[in-house]
Image (cartoon, helix red, strand yellow):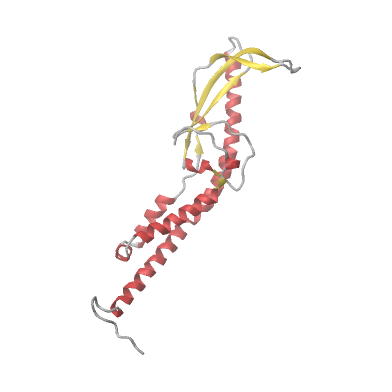
């Protein structure tokens, strides 16, 4: 996964992902021959499918945030009277917070969702975003740290709320996954057993079946 900005409120419903995974489970079972289905212990088959199709909850590790060295940056700010813009010297930096879990869910909209403009980027390992302090801080390091910390806390708060909505949907799917997989495996095993049971009544290759009139 490359860098991208998620648009939760514009994505497909998260339940579309769950339905796609359920279909994939059925398709995978269909690819197994009846002999393979019967030769594989049920618990092994269930355990393997659950491990592959579980969706890992998201976890934002806010305690492990990393911040680039702040640098001076010249910003343009609109004039209060709409007569153009004026320049102000401030500070710009970039923050990175480890994000764990199945990040593919970020392509989807959970059943509950913040109607917010998420500008942060997500890559394979981190949530990343720029921090812009559009005011002079001079040599006051403690004030700069407080302003940067406030920006980080604001982003983390929004993301934690959004992740909470996502993980709530994931829990519903994951909690029933083993039962659904077990039922799908049982259906396939029943098909295999029925086929095997019918085999003795089938004519041998080259033998013409007797037709009753």
Query: Is 77 placed left or right of 204 in the picture?
Result: right
Q: Quadrant of residue 152?
A: top right
- Viewer-nearest residue: 22 or 160: 22
Query: Where residue 104 sits in the image (x, y, percent)?
Result: 48, 42
Where in the figure is residue 89, as x and y percent of width and height?
A: 61, 12
Residue 60, image x and y in percent? 51, 36
Answer with left or right where residue 75 lies relative to residue 205. right
In the rendered image, the vertical position of residue 174 relative to residue 119, given as above or below:
below
Does residue 136 appear in the picture of this structure?
Answer: no
> Is the residue 106 above or below the residue 15 in the image?
above
Q: Is residue 42 left or right of residue 67?
A: left
Left/right placement of residue 181 relative to residue 153 reads left
Outermost top residue:
139
Image vertical order of residue 27 relative to residue 151, above or below: below
Q: Is residue 59 above or below residue 212?
A: above
Residue 64 appearing in the image? yes
Q: In what quadrant of the picture does the N terminus appear?
A: top left
Query: For the point 61% across and 30% down, which residue is it?
Result: 154
**Residue at x-position 55% and y-position 31%:** 120
Q: Residue at x 50, y 52 (%)?
A: 18
Q: Which of the image's four quarters has the C terminus?
A: bottom left
Q: Closer to the camera, 106 or 207?
A: 207
Q: How many marks?
A: 0
Question: Residue extending furthest left?
Answer: 206
Q: Find the residue positioned furthest to the bottom.
A: 213
Residue 78, quarter of picture: top right
Q: Position of residue 202 (x, y in %)?
A: 30, 78
């Amino acid at each position: 996964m490359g860098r991208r900005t998620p648009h939760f409120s514009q994505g497909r419903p998260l339940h579309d992902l769950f339905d796609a995974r359920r279909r994939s489970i059925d398709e995978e079972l269909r690819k197994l021959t009846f002999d393979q289905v019967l030769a594989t212990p049920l618990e092994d088959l269930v355990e393997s499918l659950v491990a592959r199709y579980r969706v890992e909850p998201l976890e934002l590790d806010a305690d492990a945030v990393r911040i680039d060295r702040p640098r001076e940056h010249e910003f343009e700010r609109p004039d209060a009277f709409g007569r153009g813009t004026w320049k102000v010297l401030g500070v710009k930096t970039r923050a990175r917070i480890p994000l764990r879990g199945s990040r593919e869910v970020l392509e989807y909209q959970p059943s509950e969702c913040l109607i917010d403009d998420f500008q942060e980027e997500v890559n394979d390992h981190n949530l990343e975003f720029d921090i812009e302090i559009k005011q002079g801080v001079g040599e006051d390091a403690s004030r700069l740290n407080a302003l940067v910390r406030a920006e980080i806390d604001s982003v983390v708060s929004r993301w934690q709320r959004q992740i909470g909505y996502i993980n709530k949907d994931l829990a519903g799917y994951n909690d029933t996954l083993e039962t659904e997989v077990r039922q799908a495996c049982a259906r396939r095993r029943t098909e295999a057993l029925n086929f095997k049971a019918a085999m003795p009544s089938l004519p041998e290759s080259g033998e013409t079946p007797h037709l009753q009139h």
